[in-house]
Amino acid sequence: MEVVIAPAERLARIAADAVERLLRDRPDAVLGLATGSSPLAVYDELARRHTEGGLSFARSRAFMLDEYVGLPADHPERYRNVIEKEIASRVDFAPGAVQGPDGLASDVVGACAAYEQAIVDAGGVDLQILGIGTDGHVAFNEPGSSLASRTRIKTLTRQTREDNARFFGGDLAQVPTHCLTQGLATIMSARHLVLLATGRGKAEAVHQLAEGPVSAMWPATILQHHPHVTVLVDDAAASRL
Ligand code: GLP
């Protein structure tokens, strides 16, 4: 695990550099996209490089990590719509090239299995962008998640719902209670993991991620077993290392 401590603006550039190197080398590479505030500066940087530097996503594909269950198709906080707004619509992905778990599926088990298969059929994810929750969750693999998990439905913890209430006008009641999420084993099968964390609120999670014992109670600790992980943190998030 490589840990880079740098100011937030530089972290976004480092992550964008990794994506750009991959796409220049292999234009048909498969990306893994995360939601949350942590990757937003990376998406801004990628959109800028697309517009100003000709970085193309036209032959690439992307898979999202997770999705809320039950949010209407046009809800602005539906992760499909968030990813569309923050990155997909700002670059030149081909139609249908960005996929996410279907939070409105009636057959949830079937939809999760189909999603796993779609990732496999695409050849697997080459570079997965990740954030981390204050409780050490990655995607929506909350504490207690199986380290061997695959895409499935999960109940969100109160902590995560409170953390994410800011996206729902601060109203906890509006935050969905369930999600579909790639499992920890799904995420571990990506070839390069790039995790971003900033701010003191992430310090304990980053400490556990890099230095804690591998445990389902801090799901991100499974990344210690991955052969190619880049952890990008600012001083505040690194303050407990
Ligand atoms: C959500 C997402 C995670 C993300 C986490 C942290 O729970 N499902 O993928 O890592 O939020 O979000 P933020 O980056 O806003 O702190």
Image (tube, grey):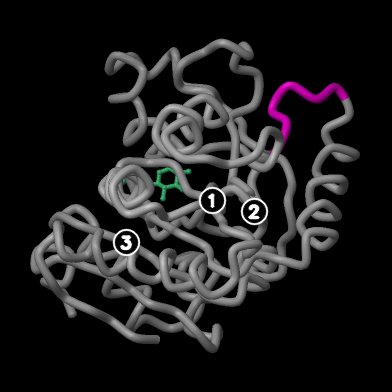
- Apparent side of residue 139 relative to residue 43 in the rendered image (left or right): right
Is residue 118 inside the magenta stretch? no
Q: Nearer the viewer, residue 142 or 39?
A: 39
Q: Compute the Cα span from label 3 to label 1.
A: 21 Å
Q: Residue at x 62, y 64 (%)?
A: 29
User: Which class describes the residues within 10 Å of circle 2: few (<14), some (14-19), or many (20+)?
Assistant: some
Mark 3 Cβ inside 8 Å of ligand 1:
yes
Q: Give amino acid for label 3.
A: Leu
- Apparent side of residue 181 relative to residue 234 in the rendered image (left or right): right
Residue 172 position, x and y percent, is 37, 19
Q: Nearer the viewer, mark 3 or mark 1?
A: 1
Q: Give amino acid for label 2.
A: Arg
Earlier residue among tags 3 and 1: 1
Q: Quadrant of residue 188?
A: bottom right
Q: Which residue is mark 3?
A: 196
Q: Quadrant of residue 208?
A: bottom left
Mark 2 Cβ inside 8 Å of ligand 1:
no
Mark 1 Cβ inside 8 Å of ligand 1:
no
Quadrant containing the N terminus is bottom left
**Mark 2 near mark 1, Cβ–Cβ under 8 Å?**
yes
Label annotation for residue 202: none
Q: Give amino acid for label 1.
A: Phe
Label annotation for residue 57: 1
Q: Which stretch is magenta? A: 101-106
Label annotation for residue 59: 2
Count of numbered circles in the view: 3
Q: Secondary structure at mark 2?
A: loop
